Image (cartoon, grey):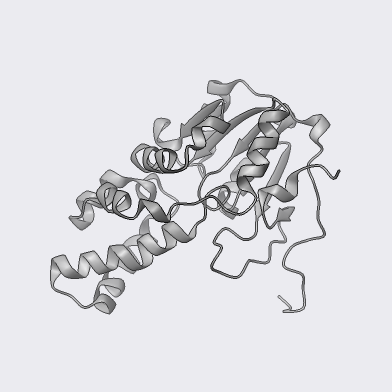
Amino acid sequence: MSSTQPLTRPPVRPQWSEIDLVLLDMDGTLLDLRFDNYFWQQLVPERYALRHGMTHEQAQAHLSPKFSAKQGTLDWYCVEYWSRELDLDIAELKREIRERIRFLPGAEAFLTALRERALRTVLVTNAHHESLAIKARQTDLTRYFDQLISSHRFGRPKEDPLFWEKLQAELGFERSRTLFVDDSLPVLRAARAFGIGQVFAISHPDSEQEGRIVQEFPAVRSVQDLMPRP
């Protein structure tokens, strides 16, 4: 890809008159992914190194293939799985640094606007229910949603077509009149394949990192950019 390409396509906004249901991802879409990146790239290797008598670098080298092998599976998002696998209390570690959990810029304004428009809004996350509870408690994000759904409830991650079938059975939505926003390209592809009418990507999921070039989907820096023009 050329370095002269824009980070995202020219701004494209949803057709709000054609939307009855808004499905929103949590981490990297509403909440700053810098928490999760710090947690898995820094804190977990640090604590694993202490427990197993390794250097930080050795721990990172040991953990990296373990993490890569599970990406895109339900285990990758599972607090219980990693607690067993790494002999660490993953939920407790998250609670320990919970003050780092924050909304991405513009996310609360966007969610407030959805509430004011009385649009049915559902949080749809791959986060394990313990992670979801910690983040919900820290941010009070539940006040913005009609329902919160973790993919662990269905036993399938959002990357899996069966997740979407189970979600539709649960919510009873019309695919063509649904908006879905996520930062994960594999998840967005699954939503598109299922026939979700309007699918948007977030190009800046981590406030401390450079954004990504997104060509496969309409993309915005922040969910706030999805709101209709004044």
Please give left or right for residue 76 compared with residue 45 in the image: right
Q: Position of residue 97 (x, y in %)?
A: 34, 55
Residue found at the far right of this picture = 230
Please give left or right for residue 161 compared with residue 132 in the image: right
Q: Position of residue 220 (x, y in %)?
A: 71, 55
Vertical relation: 90 (above or below) 213: above
The answer to whether residue 124 is seen in the rendering is: yes
Identify which residue is drawn at 42% across, 56% down: 100
Identify which residue is drawn at 41% across, 48% down: 73
Identify which residue is drawn at 26% across, 44% down: 80
The answer to whether residue 192 is seen in the rendering is: no
Vertical relation: 141 (above or below) 10: above
Out of 157 and 18, give the one closest to the viewer. Answer: 18
Q: Using the rendered view, name the quadrant where residue 62 is placed.
A: bottom left
Q: Using the rendered view, name the quadrant where residue 144 is placed.
A: top right
Out of 66 and 44, give the one closest to the viewer. Answer: 44
Q: Position of residue 17 (x, y in %)?
A: 83, 30
Identify which residue is drawn at 74% across, 53% down: 218
Which quadrant does the N terminus fall into?
Answer: bottom right
Which quadrant does the C terminus fall into?
Answer: top right
Vertical relation: 186 (above or below) 210: above
Out of 191 and 211, give the one closest to the viewer. Answer: 211
Please give left or right for residue 215 compared with residue 158 in the image: right
Q: Using the rendered view, name the quadrant where residue 181 is placed.
A: top right
Please give left or right for residue 24 compared with residue 40 in the image: right
